[in-house]
Image: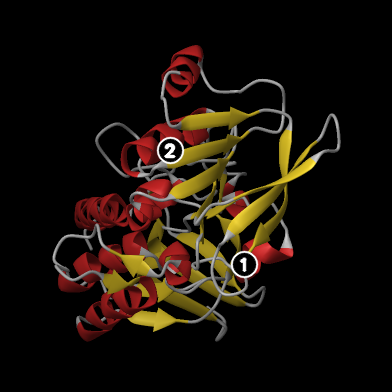
């Protein structure tokens, strides 16, 4: 092998709760895992402020602090954590090992690969949304809705996720404005009916966000009716964006089976993909739950599956 090719037993791509948990288990199984942190070291939790729903933190914890704890634990147990981005893969070798390239130059040959590249929330793309992200703007009502108990909030979106999150928020918030761009929702009829029957949810159709208002925290939102051009301001404290997520799985498309949205399909009751020796965990394969604790659980599964796979191959 040329000096620029490195051989590893277990390569983990991505560094959220799934990746770090996989690393903790792989390190304890003496698989000498190498983990590349990717574009967003620590994953989506690094842009989350307070985490109050992860077991074991009775007083809550800041998202970045929690991911730093995950990382320290993985490193202490023997994980080689590296900063870098996997830019290309070759999973064509049926029985493995598999080849990946980091930052378009370094070549790694891995006996097993765990994909934990996560997903990225889709955003509206307005300046105020970015500026106030974590200060009243959120892409996860289940994660952050708790902080707006008894207050007025708005949620953007018209699909099943938006409808589910609106009904979740309706239980804890005083009033929920649902901002739907079209004249109807994309959500299933059952979900639409559920939201329509909630007394404290007001659905505003043909409505788009013009600006999230507030200097250091959300104090309101200015919306515009895309039929009439009429603008109005809503007095809210929380602004939730629920227009979908994009799994960060593009580089694997040639080899790995995915659904029509790009989420990796794993075999039932496992983290195994259609390629032997390649496993997937976390939000890259989970579009239903998308929680830190479930991601960590699937990271554990991936490491155990990889360990069994390597043992069967005589490693």
Residue that badge 2 annotates: 165
Residue nearest the observer in this picture, 50 or 257: 50
Q: Is residue 166 left or right of residue 31?
A: right
Residue 266 appears in which quarter of the rendering? top left
Q: Is residue 58 left or right of residue 49?
A: left
The location of residue 255, given as percent across then percent down, is: 56, 44
Q: Quick one: SS at disc 2? A: helix
Q: How many marks?
A: 2
Residue 315 appears in which quarter of the rendering? bottom left
The residue located at (54%, 69%) in the rendering is 217
Numbered disc in front, either 1 or 2: 1
Residue that badge 1 annotates: 214
Residue nearest the observer in this picture, 283 or 86: 283
In the picture, the disc for residue 5 is none
Estimate the spatial distance between the alpha carbons at disc 1 and disc 2, rounded to whole Å.
23 Å
Q: Quick one: SS at disc 1? A: loop
The residue located at (26%, 64%) in the rendering is 21
From the viewer's perspective, is residue 156 above or below residue 190? Answer: below
The location of residue 177, given as percent across then percent down, is: 54, 38
């Amino acid at each position: 092998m040329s000096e620029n090719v490195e051989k590893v037993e277990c390569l983990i791509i991505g560094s959220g709760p799934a990746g770090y948990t996989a690393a903790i288990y792989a390190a304890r199984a003496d698989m000498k895992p190498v983990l590349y942190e990717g574009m967003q070291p620590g994953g989506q939790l690094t842009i989350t402020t307070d985490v109050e729903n992860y077991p074991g933190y009775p007083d809550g914890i800041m998202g970045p602090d929690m991911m730093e704890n995950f990382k320290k634990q993985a490193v202490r147990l023997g994980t080689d954590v590296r900063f870098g981005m996997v830019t290309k893969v070759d999973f064509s070798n049926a029985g493995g090992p598999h080849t990946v390239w980091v930052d378009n130059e370094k070549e790694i040959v891995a006996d097993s690969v765990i994909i934990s590249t996560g997903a990225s929330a889709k955003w509206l793309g307005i300046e105020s949304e970015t500026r106030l992200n974590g200060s009243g703007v959120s892409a996860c009502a289940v994660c952050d809705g708790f902080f707006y108990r008894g207050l007025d909030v708005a949620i953007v979106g018209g699909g099943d996720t938006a409808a589910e999150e609106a009904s979740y928020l309706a239980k804890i918030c005083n009033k929920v404005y649902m901002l739907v761009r079209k004249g109807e929702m994309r959500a299933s009829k059952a979900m639409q009916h559920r939201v329509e029957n909630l007394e404290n949810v007001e659905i505003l159709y043909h409505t788009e966000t013009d600006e999230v208002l507030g200097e250091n925290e959300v104090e309101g939102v200015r919306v515009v009716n895309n039929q009439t051009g009429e603008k109005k301001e809503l007095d809210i404290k929380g602004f939730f964006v629920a227009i979908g997520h994009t799994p960060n799985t593009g580089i694997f498309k040639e080899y790995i089976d995915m659904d029509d949205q790009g989420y990796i399909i794993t075999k039932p009751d496992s983290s195994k993909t259609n390629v032997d020796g390649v496993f997937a965990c976390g939000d890259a394969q989970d579009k239903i739950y998308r929680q830190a604790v479930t991601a960590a659980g699937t990271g554990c599964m991936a490491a155990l599956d990889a360990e069994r796979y390597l043992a069967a191959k005589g490693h």
